Image (cartoon, grey):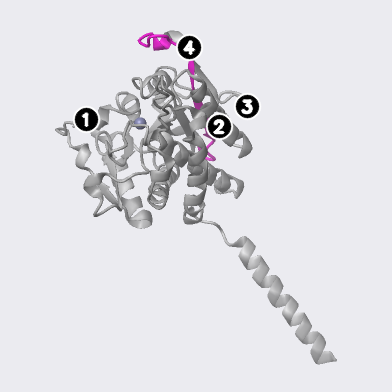
């Protein structure tokens, strides 16, 4: 009998110990990156790029529905607005779109995770959520890749950071999730933000902009484990180096700089929302899969997205944001300061 009691006791001790070990194991940035999954990206994108969203044309019903979708996501995940409680919209008046035939007001959607140590230093993650709308015959431009992919990536990244906050591992610097409107009609939403910033631009450390990360450029079909990076070394060698190091350590994608060439005729550096930050001397990285046969066509649909690859690319952006937000020193526009 005595022997029996002892062994029962030892079983209890052993099981208590192992339970304690499991719960106190500190989660790492890799665990948070792994919370970004292809299943979640796929489920969300099938809704966000569905016909119900009517192509998300700036100022139209579809864009408003898309804005509500984003707002609901942040509310449901307990991620705050930087404007005021439960107001996630940075409203842009119709007059701002004076170049449109019938100007209508629109809104950027914003959410915010406050840094634990350097809350005044802001990393801006951006993606445009508008697209080309519908034709008169009712044909819908779903914009699954452009830029449903970047928009869903931001939501998953926000969720991963919010989980880190809950675990007491939140970022040292603050992160602004900026879903800009009116990109397709001329980068209006990001321009409006940089002219009316919620946080001072001089405190804005970097902008990581994601526009199309769910497809494979036909030129890359034999080697699809890639992402084009544009602008990473234009203002900050430090940001470029961080980006390279993070990729080598955590994601191992081929970082392709083809379109970073000053002489590239596509001039993609000037063609998405990061440019409005870059022209204010804020270091940027633009993440892009290149164009493809469905670019700006009604056939840019969610069934054509490469979800595993998109997940990997999203994790790269998350890891880069994590590094920029948590490293000791603030990223600087070192190329600007040295006059290069
Ligand atoms: Zn786009």
Disc 4 from disc 3: Cα separation? 20 Å
- Of circles 4 and 3, the one toward us is 4
Q: Which residue is mark 1?
A: 267
Q: Which contiguous range is marked in magenta?
A: 96-118
Going from N to C along the chain, the mark reached first, 2 or 1, is 2
In the image, residue 313 above or below residue 230: below
**Residue 6 bears which disc, if any?**
none
In the image, residue 294 above or below residue 271: below
Q: Residues within 10 Å of mark 4 (few under 14, many from 20)?
A: few
Q: Is residue 109 magenta?
A: yes
- Of circles 2 and 1, the one toward us is 2
Disc 1 from disc 3: Cα separation? 38 Å
Do callouts 2 and 4 mark residues in contact (Cβ within 8 Å)? no
Q: Which residue is mark 3?
A: 86
Q: Which residue is mark 2?
A: 69
Going from N to C along the chain, the mark reached first, 4 or 3, is 3
In the image, residue 142 above or below residue 160: above
Residue drawn at 54 percent across, 40 percent down: 116
Q: Residue furthest right?
A: 1
Do callouts 4 and 3 mark residues in contact (Cβ within 8 Å)? no
Q: Which quadrant holds the N terminus?
A: bottom right
Q: Which residue is mark 4?
A: 93
Q: Answer with the quarter of the image where residue 301 lies.
A: top left
Q: Is residue 268 magenta?
A: no
Q: Is residue 87 visible?
A: yes
Between residues 124 and 259, which one lies in front from this camera angle?
259
- Of circles 1 and 3, the one toward us is 1
Q: Residues within 10 Å of mark 2 (few under 14, many from 20)?
A: some
Residue drawn at 52 percent across, 45 percent down: 43
């Amino acid at each position: 009998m005595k022997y029996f009691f002892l062994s029962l006791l030892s079983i209890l001790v052993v099981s208590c110990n192992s339970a304690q070990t499991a719960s106190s194991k500190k989660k790492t940035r890799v665990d948070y990156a792994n919370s970004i999954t292809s299943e979640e990206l796929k489920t969300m994108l099938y809704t966000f790029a569905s016909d119900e969203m009517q192509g998300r044309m700036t100022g139209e019903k579809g864009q408003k529905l898309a804005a509500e979708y984003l707002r609901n996501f942040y509310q449901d995940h307990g991620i705050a607005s930087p404007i005021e409680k439960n107001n996630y919209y940075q409203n842009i008046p119709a007059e701002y779109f004076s170049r449109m035939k019938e100007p209508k007001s629109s809104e950027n959607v914003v959410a915010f995770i406050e840094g634990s140590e350097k809350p005044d230093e802001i990393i801006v993650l951006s993606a445009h959520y508008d697209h080309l709308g519908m034709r008169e015959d009712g044909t819908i431009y779903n914009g699954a890749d452009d830029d449903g992919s970047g928009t869903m990536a931001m939501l998953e990244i926000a969720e991963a950071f919010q989980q880190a906050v809950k675990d007491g591992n939140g970022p040292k610097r603050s992160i602004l999730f900026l879903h800009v409107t009116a990109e397709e009609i001329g980068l209006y939403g990001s321009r409006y933000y940089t002219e009316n910033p919620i946080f001072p631009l001089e405190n804005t450390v970097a902008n990581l902009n994601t526009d199309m990360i769910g497809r494979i450029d036909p030129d890359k079909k034999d080697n699809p484990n890639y992402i084009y990076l544009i602008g990473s070394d234009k203002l900050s060698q430090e940001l470029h180096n961080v980006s390279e190091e993070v990729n080598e350590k955590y994601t191992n994608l081929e970082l392709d700089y083809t379109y970073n060439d000053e002489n590239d005729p596509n001039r993609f550096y000037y063609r998405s929302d990061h440019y409005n930050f870059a022209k204010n001397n804020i270091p940027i990285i633009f993440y892009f899969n290149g164009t493809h046969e469905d670019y700006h066509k009604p056939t840019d649909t969610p069934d054509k997205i490469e979800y595993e690859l998109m997940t990997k690319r999203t994790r790269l952006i998350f890891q880069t944001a994590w590094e920029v937000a948590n490293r000791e020193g603030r990223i600087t526009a070192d190329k600007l300061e040295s006059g290069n």
